């Protein structure tokens, strides 16, 4: 299948105009006319992930996080980014990224996570004007109140997470919950105004956590990698429909617990 045909199919479901203004999505490295027989899905295009793609004769890597965010002034082996770009081009491997457009989309990553949690109805936290039922984050209600501690056990099981960080009293009962995959603490004030009992996201910093705590908003930090590692499973279903050979490789998580 030709690269541009694969991209066309993906962008029917996850159009680029759903991405946030600061984001960088789409074909970041490569040739849209190249034939693709084998794809590697990885959360990040680390050098180790690229080496794995080379080893396995992959034609295209699809990631969630963009490898290139800002303008590149030079490409050489003196930097990690330069080395990675050279490896991709030298081994004729395309690099394509779906990031906040995938997060926002109807049946995208936010909705996929909710399915893992058995949630059937939800509302969008920050609606995207470029798509119906699209936007960052989801708010949902449980059928009955449950303690934060009990819900932590449920999250760990359903999302296959070993550890979480908590802000607030774990004995508190909750029913209305907000979730933003990845790094979502920029939304905590908006979430607070929506009168939720618990906000679930990743990458929570100390001062953000302190502000939320003083505003009586309970938080669960499930980790950035941990909240998005299911990206590979979601995308795998689409590529299998295209009859393309797919492998999954994640060089992570970055943080280790001991």
Image: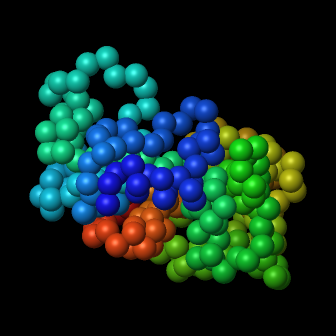
Quadrant (top left/top right/bottom left/bottom right) for the C terminus: bottom left
Q: Nearer the viewer, residue 4 or 124?
A: 4
Taking the view exactly as shown, the residue that stands out farthest to the top is 73
Q: Which of 99 and 153 is in front in this view?
A: 99
Give residue 121's quadrant in the image.
bottom right
Whether residue 195 appears in this view of the structure is yes
Q: Residue at image x 64%, y 53%?
A: 104
Q: Where is residue 178 drawn, in percent x and y?
A: 73, 60
Q: Nearer the viewer, residue 255 or 87?
A: 87
Give residue 256's quadrant in the image.
bottom left
In this image, 10 relative to 178: left or right? left
**Count of numbered labels shown in the rendering:** 0
Whether residue 166 appears in this view of the structure is no
Q: Where is residue 206 drawn, in percent x and y?
A: 59, 42
In this image, 127 relative to 17: left or right? right
Q: Nearer the viewer, residue 210 or 179?
A: 179
Quadrant (top left/top right/bottom left/bottom right) for the N terminus: bottom left
User: Does residue 112 lie above or below 68 as drawn?
Assistant: below
User: Does residue 162 lie above or below 215 as drawn?
Assistant: below
| Coloring scheme used | rainbow
Q: Where is residue 70 drawn, in percent x and y?
A: 43, 26
In this image, 195 relative to 23: left or right? right
Q: Where is residue 242 drawn, in percent x and y?
A: 39, 69
Q: Residue at image x 45%, y 43%?
A: 26
């Amino acid at each position: 299948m030709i690269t541009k045909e694969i991209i066309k199919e993906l962008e029917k479901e996850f159009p680029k105009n759903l991405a946030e203004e600061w984001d960088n999505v789409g074909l970041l490295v490569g040739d849209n006319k190249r034939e693709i027989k084998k794809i590697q899905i990885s959360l990040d295009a680390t050098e180790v992930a690229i080496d794995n793609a080379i080893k396995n004769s992959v034609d295209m890597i699809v990631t969630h996080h963009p490898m290139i965010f800002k303008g590149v002034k030079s490409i050489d082996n003196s930097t990690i980014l330069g080395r990675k770009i050279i490896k991709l081009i030298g081994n004729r491997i395309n690099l394509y990224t779906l990031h906040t457009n995938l997060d926002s989309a109807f049946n995208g990553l936010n909705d996929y996570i909710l399915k893992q949690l058995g949630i059937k109805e939800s509302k969008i936290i920050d609606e995207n004007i470029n798509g119906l039922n699209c936007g960052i984050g989801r708010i949902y209600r449980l059928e009955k109140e449950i303690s934060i501690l009990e819900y932590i056990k449920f999250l760990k099981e359903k999302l296959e997470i070993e550890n979480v960080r908590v802000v607030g009293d774990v004995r508190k009962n909750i029913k209305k919950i907000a979730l933003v995959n990845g790094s979502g603490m920029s939304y905590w004030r908006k979430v607070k105004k929506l009168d939720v009992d618990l906000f679930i996201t990743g990458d929570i910093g100390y001062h953000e956590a302190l502000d939320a705590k003083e505003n009586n908003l309970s938080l669960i930090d499930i980790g950035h990698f941990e909240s998005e590692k299911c990206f590979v499973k979601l995308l795998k279903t689409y590529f299998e429909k295209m009859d393309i050979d797919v492998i999954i490789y994640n060089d992570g998580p970055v943080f280790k617990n001991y």
